[in-house]
Image (cartoon, rainbow, N blue to C red):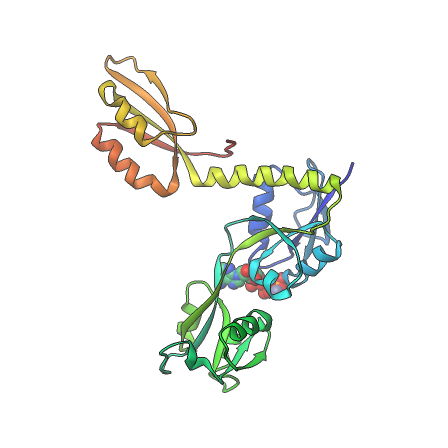
Amino acid sequence: MENLSIAIQKSGRLSEQSLDLLKESGISLANGNRKLLSAARNFPLEAVFLRDDDIPQYVFDGVTDVGIVGENVIMEKGFDLQITERLGFARCRLSIALPKSEEYKGIGDLDGKRIATSYPEILGTFLHENHLDCEIHEISGSVEIAPGIGLADAIFDIVSTGSTLISNGLKETEVVMQSEAVLVARKELSEGAREILEKLIFRIRAVQKSKNNKYILLNAPNDKLDDIAAVIPGMKSPTVMPLAEEGWSSVHSVLNENDFWDVIDKLREFGAQGILVIPIEKMIT
Ligand code: ATP
Ligand code: ZN
């Protein structure tokens, strides 16, 4: 039977969560110790462990069929790949930052500056689109120290919390792109590989959905059941079962994480008691 090969970062910010995602999708890799190659025991998949910068090229060239990598790296490398699923981890943004003492009134203030970055392509496109003429200094690693040592006037780099910028005396002035880990595929995949990919995506979606939802159980007075059902409609409609105590029912449903506290407040208003909220492991709609 055919296999789907997937490129995963060997060691770095994407590695752990990429492997967790496969694991939660019920795919266990034969050796956890990240040799170059590792075959799954219970799914037609083979993982190849690489540096994240190499993943777009390897997928594009067909060395592997798919890969998990940051959108920023996809954009920078510029290969024509298909983003098949956004994975919601390794969220960050790529921003331009200036020394905090520098006055900044708007994007025009960047004109003529020397900007240090590991992402010359993304930066170049941004500068071009904004009709800015800057000098791009490509450096790999520790970009944030460049202004301090006089190597550049500004930087363009990954920001997540902003604490690295602050500790280097910099301030974020323009957000150029948002990024998260994505599952990318080569555009031309064999039919067999495409079928396995569909199965993998189906599993990933079930895992993602379950993370955004909770199972909720509560006791409700019967005269408030309609109000309560309207607040927690669930996947189809809530399950309602009579309690042994007259006039009360047990209500089971599914609740979106984002609505959580609003919904809980309403449920309490309607007299719900004994509310239990339980994580869901997989969710298929
Ligand atoms: P490699 O050794 O594989 O080349 P690397 O050092 O280039 O690794 P990492 O630092 O592991 O890369 O980052 C991998 C990806 O994680 C980045 O391309 C980006 O998408 C994301 N990322 C980087 N820094 C952060 C951060 N501080 N917060 C969230 N996501 C981040
Ligand atoms: Zn890298």
- Residue 155 in the image: above or below residue 272: below
Q: Is residue 92 left or right of residue 81?
A: left
Place of residue 158 in the rendered image (x, y in percent of width and height, measured from the top left): 50, 67
Q: Could you tell me residue 238's position as x and y percent?
A: 37, 24
The residue positioned 42% from the left and 26% from the top of the image is 236
Whether residue 131 sits left or right of residue 12 in the image: it is: left
Q: Residue at x 30, y 15 (%)?
A: 243
Question: Which residue is pictured at 25% across the width and 37% down the height?
Answer: 265
Q: Which is nearer the eye, 69 or 274?
A: 69
Taking the image as shown, residue 204 lies to the left or right of residue 107, namely right
Outermost right residue: 1
Question: Where in the figure is residue 251, as x and y percent of width and height?
Answer: 34, 23
Front position in the image: 123 or 272: 123
Q: Position of residue 176 (x, y in %)?
A: 48, 67
Question: Residue 149 versus residue 134: which sits nearer the camera?
Answer: 134
Q: In the rendered image, which quarter contains the N terminus?
A: top right
Image-quarter location of ligand 1: bottom right
Q: Residue at x 65, y 47 (%)?
A: 32
